[in-house]
Structures are given as structure tokens and as C-alpha cells.
Image (cartoon, rainbow, N blue to C red):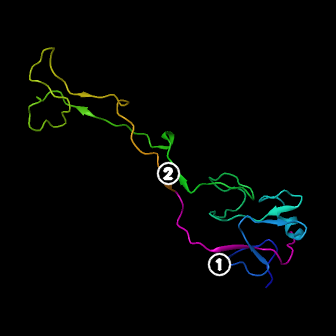
Amino acid sequence: MDPILGQIQAFGFNFAPRGWAKCDGTLLAISSNSALFSLLGTTYGGDGRTTFALPDLRGRSGRHQGTGPGLSTVTIGQRSGSETHTLTVPEMPSHNHVINLGAKEEGNTDSPSGAFIAGDGTSSFGTSTDVQMATNSTLNSGGNIPFNIQNPFLVVNYCIATQGLYPSRN
């Protein structure tokens, strides 16, 4: 069966068969690939006068054009996404850090439970009271190190038909 010109196919081997080219963003001459250019145009790159680019699927997953329930609209040739991401403060779940400072136990107690600031056994200014620090009084922590957000994947060789039947519109 002849492929359709511009058809993208996954292959389990590491080369592009005759009549196919790897989907690696290669620039092709319009003069020697005019039929394929008439389908792709400069959607994937090129200057549109002498060259056009093949789709570059290296490090990318395919997605259908248009929109779907709960999805944003995308167009053919649009690139998006990243292999890694570093969380920013607005992306973190709402939370706080509470530290209880016990001031009622004496500093000479063997294990003053939760008492980071200890009393001295006297109440010079009134009754000692445990206090809770303000929520913004703790230091920031973390390393701002990007983490991998890729889905699990299996690498195959995506190629595009550079020869084949010219597609007709329905």
C-alpha cells in the first residue's frame, strides 16, 4: 500500500525508509519537494521562498489540533511543554508552618517538651504563657531545583512520507 504524502508513521528501526524522512525538523528545498510543500507550507519552519521544514518530533509527543473538554485550543505546528519544571510559590499548595514555643518549662529541665525558649522559674512580669510564632516568621527552604515532568515513554523513529499519493479533501 502506498503511503499518503505527508503521512507520519512510527517505525521500530533507526533509519528512514526510501520515500520517507525523519521528523527531525530538517529543512528541505521547495524546488525538489513542491508537492509536500503544498501540504506543509512553513507550518514547521523554513523561509517559504526556498526552504520549508519537516515536523520536529524529537522530545515531543503528538496531539490532535483543536480543543477538547477542559483543554486549551492548539493549532497544527504549535509547540508547547517542557521536560522539567521548577515550582514557583503560586503553584505550591496553600500551607503554613506552625512553631509552638513553650516558655513555661524551666531551662534546666532534662527534656523541655517543645520548649525552645525556656523560662527561669520566676514570673517577674506575670504568668509565663506558651506562644505561637507568626506564620511569616519561618525561613524559606528548598533548592529551586527543576524536576522531571515527562510521562513514561518509549523511543521509536517517527518519519514523514516524502513520496506517495497526494491526499484529496473530503
Q: Is residue 158 magenta?
A: yes
| Residue at horizontal 12 percent and vertical 30 percent from the top | 107
Decide: is 88 above or below 166. above
Q: CA distance from mark 2 to mark 1?
A: 31 Å
Q: Do we see residue 170 in this rendering? A: no
Q: Residues within 10 Å of mark 2 (few under 14, many from 20)?
A: few
Q: Which amino acid does the dot numbered 2 rest on? A: Pro
Q: Quadrant of residue 118?
A: top left
Q: Nearer the viewer, residue 103 or 12?
A: 12
Q: Is residue 65 magenta?
A: no
Work out which residue is located at the far top of the displayed protein and give it.
Answer: 125
Q: What kind of element bears circle 2?
A: loop
Q: What kind of element bears circle 1?
A: loop
The quadrant of the picture occupied by the N terminus is bottom right
Which residue is label 1 attached to?
A: 14
Q: Which residues are magenta?
A: 149-170
